[in-house]
Image: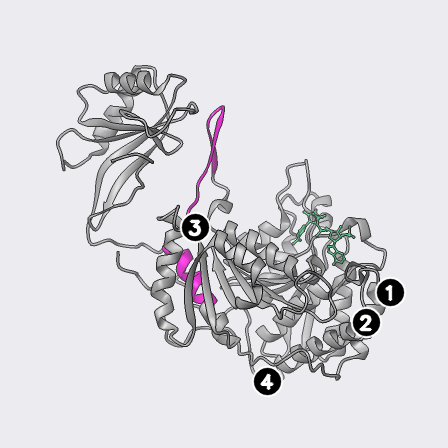
Amino acid sequence: MSYHVFMTTAAPRQASGGASAPGARHAVTLIAGDGIGPEVAQATKAILEAAGARIDWEDAVAGKEAFDKGIGNGVAPETLESLARTRVALKGPLETPVGHGGKSANVTLRKLFEMYGNIRPCKELPNVQGPFAGRGIDLIVVRENVEDVYAGIEHMQTPGVAQCLKLISQKGCEKIVRLTYELARAQGRKMVHTATKANIMKMTEGYLKRVAEQVSQEYPDIKSEHIIIDNCCHKLVMSPEKFDVIVSTNMNGDIVSDLTSGLVGGLGLAPSMNIGDDAIMFEAVHGTAPDIAGQDKANPTALLLAAVMMLRHFGMFDTAMAIEHALWVTLEGGTFTGDIALGRPAVGTKKFTETIMSNLGKTSAGLGTREYKPIKMPQVAKAPDLVKAAQRQDVGVDVFIESGLLPDAFGKAVEKATWGCALKLKNVSNRGVQVWPTAASAFDGVDHYGCRFFPAEPKAKVTDKQVTDLLTKLTTAGLRWMHIEKLIEIDGKPGFAKSQGES
Ligand code: NAP
């Protein structure tokens, strides 16, 4: 299959209110959030102002306050308007309602503004104790943020079998891979690992691998490697300092980025950015920590580091660096909030914030240097990306049927029911393992069979009429089908996986 490159490489547009003329001011939607949100947001804002960041804040409401006003998606309309205008938000954590059906306000914001990339840096901070202290960890996880099983397309197949669709698109893969390489370039990073489970899910996870192999050729200055996601986790724990940038699909990226946060001291220190073409949202990884809310105990570092990323996005590199140095000097000087004190004396949020502000202008020898540039955002076509194949043909159909029969009786029943159809039963599988006409292993199945049909006449064209005739015969015979999948060949290659044991 050829790769349709829908993003132009010429003069990429700087999306979402990015770097502009030196000295320019930037409007930012500030969502303080719930629980410890207002405390860490206030601290972050104070430090940015003390550092001279040229930001005009627009205070906005989302989360508990919005839910309490009866706003079902948890985001006030004025907040959406503000974000549509500023295109950049700094957001404190938002409480997700449990048990009364409200949507997550975080998910609402990410989805409404199609923030397709989640970027989570993970850098060791000075004097933060832990099993990996001293290893010099400085890596970034880039997670695709919109597709995969998190699209939430789930169906009960039978009363006892649930299904979730894992949708991975070429467009989604290209966007996230290009973003990753542009981010790597902007930060002078040397290595990108594409972490997938392509050895098992060859089409979906394999898509990211194939697109990365293609796109990486345009970035010869960066070393590229594919790594199986489980091996990636193993190596992250064995030698995390060897990683630079990791890109992954949504669920794998979610898991790996939490793992990497844990490597450098946990939630209070982990920033993140959700990036899309229309808006970018900077936030802490942690939640509202209700147990310590309002007690002057919260660590503002995660949100502060998210704000540092925001300043770099605006091109305020010197201010960003000054704040990072002040934070490092603070930690090197032994000022800690309770979560990272680990037996050492701790200060409250306010004192920690004041200390950082008083350290502005000082430099830490330990921080090191990195030359940051603005990320050149990939150009994204808004229209659905219609990927065309030179040749494409319907070659068969999988029909999924609910039955409590054992495989042999079931296979014979389906054969009998569809006798005389233009499409002929080739094999039956149960949870991806062939169970009829021959079985790959001892049967311990469920009431959810996949029946694969191909034309009785080899190589004949499959028509929709043949499929509907087949379904009618199955229904007439009392066989309850719950979904079908057309089997297609694209450019002569099968666009479907074989079951375990299928010839
Ligand atoms: P959490 O709020 O992240 O808190 C877990 C624990 O981590 C806290 O109890 C606290 O531990 C510690 N912690 C987290 N952030 C800290 C900080 N900045 N400073 C010091 N300690 C910190 O996770 P959760 O309890 O699972 O979630 C609570 C609520 O937050 C839920 O409604 C959830 O939906 C929401 N949430 C929102 C976001 C978001 O807005 N992006 C993300 C995650 C969760 P100690 O007990 O040791 O004090």
Residue assigned mark 3: 197
Q: Amino acid at mark 1?
A: Pro
Q: Are marks 3 and 1 in contact (CB under 8 Å)?
A: no
Q: Amino acid at mark 4?
A: Pro
C-alpha gap between disc 3 and disc 1 = 44 Å
Q: Are marks 2 and 1 in contact (CB under 8 Å)?
A: yes
Residue assigned mark 4: 22
**Where is residue 469 shown, x and y percent of the image?**
23, 24
Which residues, given as a range, are shown in magenta?
154-180
Mark 1 and ligand 1: say if the CB distance to the nearest ligand atom is below 8 Å. Answer: no
Residue assigned mark 2: 334
| Whether residue 352 is visible | yes
Query: In the drawing, what numbered circle is on residue 345?
Result: 1
Q: State which mark lies toward you, 1 or 4.
A: 1
Q: Residue at x 47, y 40 (%)?
A: 153
User: What is the secondary structure assignment of the residue under circle 3?
Assistant: loop
Q: State which mark lies toward you, 3 or 4.
A: 3
Query: Up-down: is 340 above or below 17?
Result: above
